Amino acid sequence: MDEKELQNLLKNRIHHTLLPLFDKYNRDFSDLESLLKWKPLVLLIGNYSSGKSTLINELTGEEIQRTGQAPTDDSFTIITHDGPEQAGTEIPGSSLVNDDNLPFTGLKDQCEQLISHLHLKKVATPLLGDMAIIDSPGMLDSVTEKDRGYDYMAVISRLAKLADLVVLMFDPLKAGTIKETYTAIRDTLPASAGEDRLVFVMSRIDECDSTSDLVRSYGALCWNLSQMTGRKDIPQIFLTCAPDSPRPGLDITPWSQERDQLKNKILTAPKFRVFHILQDIDRQVNELQLTCEAMVNFSKQVRTKILDIGKVTLVTAILAFFFSGLLSKLLFGFPEQSLLEALLQGEVGLAHLSFPLAGVTLVVMGCWIWLTRITFPRLLKQRLAAPKSLVTLETDYRRHLWNKVEPHVVALLRSAGLGQVFAAHSRNLQKIKKFLQQDLKEFYEKIR
């Protein structure tokens, strides 16, 4: 079974099994659904002089993107191949964000300014037949330059979630010092893409006058990355330059193979498409499981309270049925004969049941009011104050997931009524566990 067949099988299984559960717990399924559409994606980001367009032109063998030291393109450009007859075709952003067959509908909520800076190019490069590359506007540093008219980081976050590979490119002169680069690496990308999808590249090393200059630039980039990621261990950084651009002052022979390794890594990204989809499904379904577990445990606690009040209601109702008439007679002088007296004399009639039934009704109403106005709100308030008590967080992974789902669980609890308590949360939880333990495991085994 090839990747496309496996992806279609996975899509059908998810829609049949998971989509109803995501809907039931108001979980956003759009990101996962978008991943199952169209082609594998590679996202290139970096400052405007980092060599993104040069790399794309080299990969495709065509002058598709303009290159230069100054900003040459302020658009998100999606580049792919759909057959020789489609070469040269361009699709504007307004069409891309309204096509349900493409994964870009999530960008529709951005302003018109973004849509006018988004388009798709179809090129005559069969190499991109099974994938697409997204070239992005260069990251900026100045506050005044940052005003693009749309939320640049929100767009990067959205595209990074869709991408099977995110290539971050730096040049020796601005080795990780751009403010938007810091924001992307520190905040945006960790929440949008796994570490295995991130590739770091310092391009244009030919612009270094000597090996010493290169070492200083590389060291500066490593230092900046450690500050941005908060980690001491630095990931691999590809050192590359365009093959026709080396200067006499620097011997790039030791790094000549890294350009080919980088290109190979980009072009083999489609092979990891299904694995990345499974990773995202795994994470989102585990988040859904935590949400469902919280609702299961909250429902159990409410049902325990209902059971306790039910027991009190039953005992009190029995006492009210037999003694309400006698109590009323002692306090107010009526009825003339209580149900208990009538039972002792063996002369019970319908008239004797009015006070007992009224007493039972008052007891039931009182207990219901106690449950709905005091007990349930009090329990809900306690759980809203400490929602973490509803789940068991025995691993760092579950604690990390809980930090993401806790606001959603709180929102569900706030909207929960007594009717939610009797929903089929336990059965839903079993379906989720079955998918994680059986279905997902089966798909992982298929891609080994």
Image (cartoon, grey):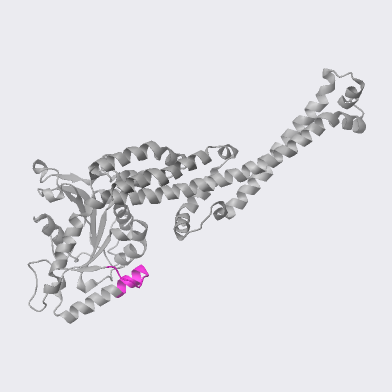
Q: Nearer the viewer, residue 311 or 138?
A: 311
Magenta residues (range): 223-235
Q: Residue at x 13, y 57 (%)?
A: 59
Whether residue 304 is visible to the viewer of this picture, yes or no, is: yes
User: Where's residue 293, x and y in %?
Assistant: 51, 47
Q: Is residue 214 above or below residue 47?
A: below
* Left or right placement of residue 364 versus residue 393 in this view: right
Q: Is residue 371 above or below residue 203?
A: above
Q: Is residue 208 above or below residue 352?
A: below
Q: Residue at x 53, y 48 (%)?
A: 294
Q: Tally the marks.
A: 0
User: Is residue 270 on the magenta stretch?
Assistant: no
Residue 219 found in image quarter: bottom left
User: Where's residue 75, x and y in %?
Assistant: 21, 54
Whether residue 110 is visible to the viewer of this picture, yes or no, is: no
Q: Residue at x 11, y 73 (%)?
A: 253
